[in-house]
Image (cartoon, grey):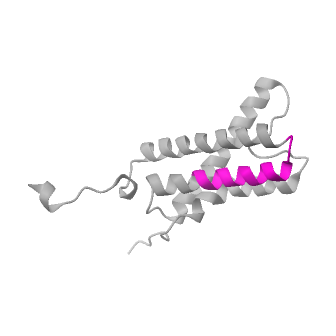
Amino acid sequence: MTTMTHSARAFPDARHSPLVTAALAFLFWVLAAITVLAAHVALDPISPPGAVATKIGAIVVAAFLYIRLTARHCTVDHALLVGIAWLLLDIAAEIMTASHLGKGWFALTGTPMKPAVRDVLLLAWVAAPSLFARHPPQTPR
């Protein structure tokens, strides 16, 4: 009888457990990282500015999909935390890849030889999810 009085909440509207939230954030980071890596491999030799624009677009699209498909009513705090987690995952992936290859590898965050591009990519990783957060943080009463 309770199904008649209470409608089921859609997945993006429901509050998820921390483990599910972390898994979803990781899944969408993988999507963004693969797309950024593909743009790096395909476009960097042809057009570095086009590659940077494509990388930023891929990050923003992944952030949009994460927010709309999994956390539609998240706070800005949640979105910034996801962005910081994405940046930490980028750094960890680059460190592991560089140690495996034996040389520097900067496909996800940009090369240190171009600091302006690197700064823009780092900012994109952190800020992209918060672009789509709708609700301010709740203050306790």
60 drawn magenta:
yes
Q: Residue furthest right?
A: 113
Q: Answer with left or right where residue 3 lies relative to residue 93.
A: left
Q: Which residues are magenta?
A: 45-62
Instruction: Find residue 19 and report its horizontal and vertical position in percent.
Output: 44, 42
Main SS, magenta region, reads helix
Q: Answer with left or right where residue 124 lies relative to residue 72.
A: right
Q: Residue at x 62, y 47 (%)?
A: 86
Q: Residue at x 52, y 58 (%)?
A: 78
Q: Residue at x 66, y 45 (%)?
A: 88
Q: Residue at x 63, y 58 (%)?
A: 128
Instruction: Find residue 115 and report its horizontal and vertical position in percent.
Output: 87, 53
Task: Name the image quarter holding the C terminus.
Answer: bottom left
Is residue 89 among what the camera can see? no
Q: Which of the two residues, 93 or 10, is positioned nearer the viewer here?
A: 10
Is residue 25 among what the camera can see? yes
Q: Answer with left or right where residue 1 lies relative to residue 82.
A: left
Q: Answer with left or right where residue 42 lies relative to residue 115.
A: left
Task: Name the image quarter holding the N terminus.
Answer: bottom left
